[in-house]
Amino acid sequence: MKTVLIVLGLLLSPSEPKEKIRVVTTLQLYRDVVEKIGGDRVEVTALAHPRRDPHYIPANPVMQRKAAGADLFIETGRSLEIWTANLLRASNENNRLFASTGCTVKELPKVISREWGDIHPAGNPHVWLDPWNMKRIARNITEALAKVDPDGKMVYFGNLKKYDRALDEAMFGKKLVKEEGGGFLWRKLRLGKLDTYLKEEGIEEELGGWLRKARVLRGIKVVSYHKTWIYMADRFGFEVVDELEDKPGIEPSPQARDAVVRLMKKEGIRVILNGVMYPTRAADYVAEKTGAKVVVIPIDVGGIDGTDTYLKLINTILDKMVEAEK
Ligand SMILES: [Zn+2]
């Protein structure tokens, strides 16, 4: 019997793990990336419902069991998911990945405190809404998988290459990525020199993808419910002038709403971004007073229909904003 088992073992492809690598993530969008990078080698579950506020997910015993059995646990970090503290035992620490590691964090508070209700004590944690950060996140996830499952390293890095390419093409359009290379385009974009370059080369019209779509959003001012959008705004060139929340995590007071109404009238702001997980009461009130449009948008994969991947999520957010700006 023993010999049979050994022979069987030899017959199995050496790259196939005996058991699947069990990955548990907080957000659904990390699940999507793990599936893309890990393929058949992994089995992945996400804990956060995409229509719930990721800051406040009630942790339960089922989640606890899933987290405890994970070979790899992935969360954003930067104090986004404060609820994971109750899920993880000390033994998990080695297999815990903070996906935002290496992303440049914006809105770092000068004094770190939760006393006044700020739920962004370690800077703005919503880093994934910038596709550039998503490239870093995908690499972090790839490296973490390769560490847990060294036999799969080649597979993981091969899949990362494909995923990177897909992100580049979604950002700049297939044609431009083919001609110029994704790395080159990102460098130009991050230096603020992409427009000039495309103009000089006479290939402005070859720009495709999200950047093309978001051209009409350049320079526009919007208001949002929560401080969710800074990364996306900076990348795509729109400006979030104010939030309806007085402080992140605190529901707007009537005074705060009225102050926003005055500001929006003064600045001619026509768009209010409201994440699907937040009440629209305040946004509807402000919209009624100003004639602006409330854009209810998901921030995680699966937050609304048609957003079952990260690429579709970003695409949908941009579509909705463009539609509202018309
Ligand atoms: Zn937040």
Image (cartoon, helix red, strand yellow):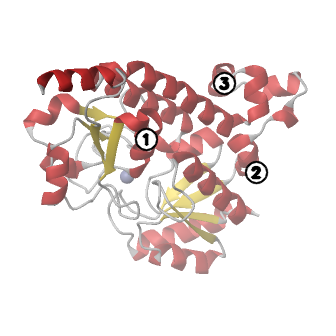
Q: Residue at the location (62% across, 26% down)?
A: 190
Query: Which numbered disc, 2 or 3, marks the residue closer to the eye?
Result: 3
Marks 1,3: beta carbons within 8 A? no
Image coordinates of residue 112 in percent, x first then y, are: 25, 40
In the rendered view, does 94 fall on the left or right side of 39? left
Query: Which numbered disc, 1 or 2, marks the residue closer to the eye?
Result: 1
In the rendered view, does 104 fall on the left or right side of 263? left
The extreme right residue here reads 202
Q: Is residue 114 visible?
A: no
Which residue was labeled with disc 1? Answer: 35
Q: CA distance from mark 2 to mark 3?
A: 23 Å
Q: Residues within 10 Å of mark 2 (few under 14, many from 20)?
A: some
Report the front residue among 111 and 44: 44
Work out whether mark 2 precedes mark 3 in sequence or the reverse, and give the earlier one. 3
Tell me if residue 133 comes above or below residue 258 in the rendering: above
Which residue was labeled with disc 3? Answer: 182
Q: Residue at the location (88% across, 22% down)?
A: 201
Q: CA distance from mark 1 to mark 3?
A: 23 Å
Amino acid at dot 1: Glu
